[in-house]
Image: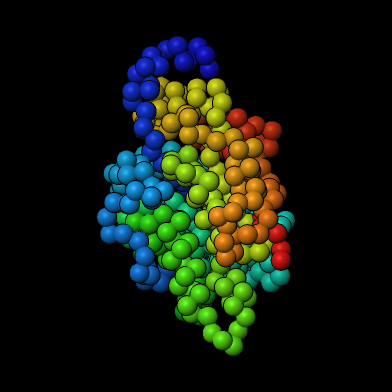
């Protein structure tokens, strides 16, 4: 990438670069044509009505505002270049779940083609940095009983809520299944704030007749996704530890981000933002990229700040690169376990108690 780097003054790059989250995903998942319903999205008494956060918040107001300005284009594949990445993320997630968290009784969706099973049947999933709901809707269509999408921007969450009722969202179930799946969106809140509120709320709901630990674990999540988000928060370790606290034993945390390499600077910033224009200038800051080893250290190392469900040991169980295929203008991606130099995705599992 050195020849590319010399084409643009580094001082101009530094002056223009500001970190903006490139949240995720696509509205099509791998070979699943099932449809389901979204109950009226309601949020508990948590979250903010505006993009203002206290000094201790793990949210960058500049990041939140920039994503809010992009909200109306979230589902437009021509304006959102990461839309094409969703199918391989879904494939990676499905492969990991099938291998490390198989369902004992996957349901068959009678509205889909014959013998098509819903791989996420009865899973409770949290989508951190859900944006306009691209991944969130896909996870629900794949059979999850509950998908909670949380984002620091109230504006993008409103887009997600509206789209969940759009006819193209395909979130419509036959009446017999309408109570089986649920999407909830919570905007204006960080995952740290969500974890505190969620755990405290369900702790108050515990009944004397049930084991407190078992009941609390029931309210936690089987799968948590944090895709293209940790490179856009002030303290990624805090975000990841909060996510771990909401994960059930045997639960899986999925993280995707960009590696901090010369190659990623040339491709993810110079080529994507300044040459092709596929990504708005200022979307990424190279110093905020993270290597697989660094993320594994943050997730799998013990921490004195872990509490409630967060004190379980985590282990990396899968890792793959996400590589853009030529011709690059089509924005088509593939998984490549041998190339994590730029975009990559990893899976981490909490030990079974």
The residue sitting at 49% across, 74% down in the picture is 202
Q: Quadrant of the C terminus?
A: bottom right
- On screen, 156 above or below 125? above
Q: Is residue 198 left or right of residue 216?
A: left
Looking at the image, which is closer to me, 43 or 278? 43
Q: Residue furthest front?
A: 304
- Is residue 248 toward the left or the right of residue 141 in the image? right
The correct choice, above or below, for 272 with respect to 100 in the image is above
The number of callouts visible is: 0
Can residue 139 be seen here? The reply is no
- Which x, y percent locates residue 4? 47, 15
Q: Quadrant of residue 282?
A: top left
* Residue at left offset 39%, top offset 35%: 19
**x, y percent for residue 220:** 56, 67
Q: Residue 197 versus residue 159: which sits nearer the camera?
A: 197
Against 74, residue 150 (above or below) is below
Q: Residue at x 38, y 57 (%)?
A: 189
In the displayed image of the protein, which residue is found farthest to the bottom?
209
Q: Position of residue 11 (x, y in %)?
A: 37, 17
Of residues 237 and 187, the one nearer the viewer is 237
Colouring used for the render: rainbow
In the drawing, does residue 228 fall left or right of residue 300? left
Q: Is residue 239 visible?
A: yes
Toward which corner of the image does residue 102 lie, by quadrant? bottom right
Percent across and percent down for residue 42 are 36, 70
Q: In this view, does 180 lie above or below 255?
A: below
Q: Which residue is drawn at 40% across and 27% down?
A: 273
């Amino acid at each position: 990438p050195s020849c590319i780097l010399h084409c643009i003054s580094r001082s101009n790059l530094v002056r223009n670069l500001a970190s903006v989250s490139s949240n995720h995903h696509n509205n099509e998942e791998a070979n699943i044509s099932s449809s389901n319903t979204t109950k009226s999205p309601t949020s508990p008494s948590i979250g903010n009505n505006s993009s203002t956060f206290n000094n201790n918040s793990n949210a960058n107001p500049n990041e939140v505002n920039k994503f809010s300005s992009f909200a109306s284009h979230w589902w437009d594949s021509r304006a959102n270049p990461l839309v094409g990445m969703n199918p391989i993320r879904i494939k990676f997630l499905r492969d990991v779940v099938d291998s490390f968290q198989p369902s004992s009784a996957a349901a068959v969706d009678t509205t889909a083609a014959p013998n098509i099973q819903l791989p996420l049947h009865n899973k409770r999933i949290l989508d951190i940095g859900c944006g306009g709901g691209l991944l969130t809707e896909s996870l629900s269509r794949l059979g999850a009983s509950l998908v909670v999408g949380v984002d620091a921007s109230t504006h993008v969450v409103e887009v997600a809520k509206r789209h969940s009722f759009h006819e193209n969202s395909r979130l419509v179930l036959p009446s017999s299944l309408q109570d089986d799946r649920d999407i909830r969106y919570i905007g204006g809140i960080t995952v740290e704030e969500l974890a505190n509120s969620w755990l405290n709320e369900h702790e108050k709901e515990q009944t004397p007749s049930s084991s407190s630990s078992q009941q609390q674990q029931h309210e936690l999540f089987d799968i948590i996704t944090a895709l293209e988000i940790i490179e856009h928060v002030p303290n990624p370790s805090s975000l990841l530890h909060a996510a771990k606290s909401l994960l059930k034993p045997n639960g899986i945390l999925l993280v995707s981000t960009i590696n901090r390499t010369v190659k990623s600077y040339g491709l993810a910033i110079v080529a994507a933002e300044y040459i092709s224009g596929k990504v708005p200038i200022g979307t990424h800051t190279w110093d905020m990229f993270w290597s697989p080893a660094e993320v594994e250290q943050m997730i799998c190392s013990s921490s004195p700040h872990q509490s409630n469900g967060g004190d379980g040991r985590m282990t990396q169980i899968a890792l793959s690169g996400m590589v853009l295929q030529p011709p690059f203008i089509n924005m088509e991606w593939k998984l490549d376990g041998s190339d994590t130099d730029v975009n990559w995705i990893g899976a981490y599992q909490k030990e079974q108690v």
